[in-house]
Image (cartoon, rainbow, N blue to C red):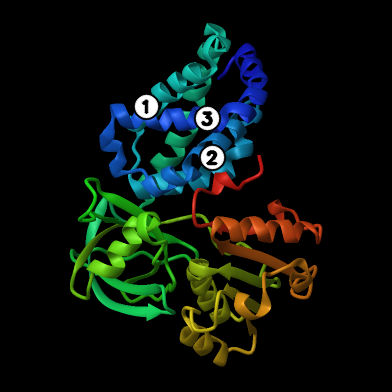
């Protein structure tokens, strides 16, 4: 239990964190990786280069500081991060390392302003915050379908549009695939030939069929020096019969709506993958679903045949494709025709898409807190705290 004095000191640092948070986390990652390069086998270096991870960590620290009196207020965000930590195999022994270099980064950036009193308070606060993560992740490790990463053989690969591939895999060992939850993801670990570290990425499950296989999709991200390390490796260097390593399914993005609610499943690009599993599962249950996917062109739409097959057997499914080359960007004028008092919104896509949709929804007086969402990137980098 934190002392009243410690809580007051931490809350007093909120304006400083708002001003210098990203700078602190940037220094934190640089110093930590210099001292512990082995952690590069866990962390997403692409997110590091793009600044997403620094922003996400800064937002997490800021949220903890703002709610230090009632840390239970940030449990929903901690839960989402904890799922990713479990999937990446972040362990309890990593937290002291993170704490050491986070405190050093605070001192380095703030200099003399980081008094002994402030540093002692933040050391105590970090211990309390870390204990919340550790306890939550411990339970997730205990419930995981299997430990660590296991080998899976690729049994099918299919092109989905011009820049996405869907993969079907089955376990090499005798592993029981759990009952999957629509919206979950798996974490793939590969060793790219042009990189010295292992690389891990989360990929959403696009189907919850119970046949002993896992199905996920991978969009080829970027090009040249900005190309996605793992996505290009999977697209270019893996074939049917090859094996990859996967950790147990994870994630807290799932349908939580009352049965009488209509779902608006709104996605862009690779964000279609968790929506596919939700569409499949919820249409089977007889729910009214409006499936809206935003794509650059009609030729690039992924899973078009699969969506058509689902909608063909259900009168409760409506499908809308919003094409940027014909329809422009999605606006509040479009959205207002799809949303009423009985609609629950589920949203998934890239960071720019998410920011744009939240801005357009705000014009309809719909707050971020009223939307179920999962970005492809650190959630805390776009979460209001």
Q: Quadrant of residue 117?
A: top right
Which residue corresponds to mark 3?
A: 23
Residues packed near mark 1 inside 10 Å, few (<14), some (14 to 19) or many (20 plus): some
Label pair 1/2, CB-CB below 8 angstroms: no
User: Relative to the observer, which residue lies in front, 85 or 24?
Assistant: 24
Residue 44 seen in the figure: no
Q: In the figure, is residue 335 to the left or right of 111?
A: right
What SS does tag 2 mark? helix
Given the current orientation, which residue lies at the most extreme front position? 224
User: Relative to the observer, which residue lies in front, 83 or 19?
Assistant: 19
What SS does tag 1 mark? helix
Q: Which badge, 3 or 2, comes first in the chain's sequence? A: 3
In the rendered image, the vertical position of residue 135 relative to residue 322, given as above or below: above
Which quadrant of the rendered structure holds the N terminus? top right
Q: Position of residue 303 (x, y in %)?
A: 46, 80
Q: Which badge, 1 or 2, comes first in the chain's sequence? A: 1
In the rendered image, the vertical position of residue 43 relative to residue 182, given as above or below: above
Label pair 3/2, CB-CB below 8 angstroms: no
Q: Residue at x 55, y 13 (%)?
A: 114
Q: Position of residue 6 (x, y in %)?
A: 60, 14
Q: Position of residue 176 (x, y in %)?
A: 28, 65
Which quadrant of the rendered structure holds the C terminus? top right
Which residue corresponds to mark 1?
A: 31
User: Relative to the observer, which residue lies in front, 163 or 282?
Assistant: 163
| Labels 3, 2: front one | 3
Which residue corresponds to mark 2?
A: 55
Q: In the figure, is residue 290 to the left or right of 170?
A: right
Q: Quadrant of residue 58?
A: top right
């Amino acid at each position: 239990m934190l002392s009243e004095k410690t809580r007051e000191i931490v809350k007093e640092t909120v304006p400083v964190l708002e001003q210098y948070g990203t700078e602190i986390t940037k220094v934190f990652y640089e110093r930590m990786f210099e001292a512990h390069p082995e952690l590069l086998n866990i962390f997403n270096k692409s997110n590091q280069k793009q600044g997403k991870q620094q922003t996400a960590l800064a937002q997490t620290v800021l949220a903890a500081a703002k709610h230090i009196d009632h840390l239970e207020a940030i449990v929903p965000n901690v839960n989402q991060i904890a799922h990713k930590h479990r999937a990446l195999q972040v362990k309890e022994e990593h937290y002291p390392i993170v704490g050491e270099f986070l405190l050093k980064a605070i001192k380095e950036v703030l200099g003399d302003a980081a008094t002994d009193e402030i540093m002692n308070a933040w050391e105590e606060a970090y211990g309390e915050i870390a204990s919340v993560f550790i306890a939550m992740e411990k339970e997730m490790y205990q419930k995981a379908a299997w430990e660590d990463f296991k080998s899976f053989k690729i049994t099918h690969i299919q092109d989905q549009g011009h820049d996405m591939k869907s993969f079907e895999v089955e376990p090499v060992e005798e592993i029981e695939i759990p009952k999957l939850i629509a919206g979950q993801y798996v974490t793939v670990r590969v060793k790219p030939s042009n990189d010295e570290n292992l690389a891990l990425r989360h990929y959403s499950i696009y189907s919850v069929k119970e046949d002993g296989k896992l199905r996920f999709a991978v969009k080829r991200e970027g090009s040249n020096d900005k190309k996605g390390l793992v996505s290009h490796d999977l697209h270019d260097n893996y074939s049917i019969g090859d094996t990859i390593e996967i950790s147990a399914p994870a994630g807290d993005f799932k349908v939580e709506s009352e049965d009488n609610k209509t779902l608006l499943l709104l996605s862009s690009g690779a964000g279609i993958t968790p929506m596919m599993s939700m569409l499949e599962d919820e249409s089977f249950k007889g729910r009214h679903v409006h499936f809206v996917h935003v794509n650059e062109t009609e030729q690039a739409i992924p899973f078009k045949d699969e969506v058509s097959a689902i909608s063909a057997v259900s009168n409760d499914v409506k499908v809308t494709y919003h094409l940027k080359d014909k329809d422009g960007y999605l606006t509040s004028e479009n959205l207002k025709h799809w949303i009423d008092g009985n609609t629950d919104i589920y949203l998934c896509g890239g960071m720019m898409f998410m920011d744009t949709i939240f801005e357009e929804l705000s014009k309809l007086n719909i707050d971020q807190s009223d939307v179920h969402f999962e970005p492809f990137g650190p959630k805390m980098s776009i979460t209001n705290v």
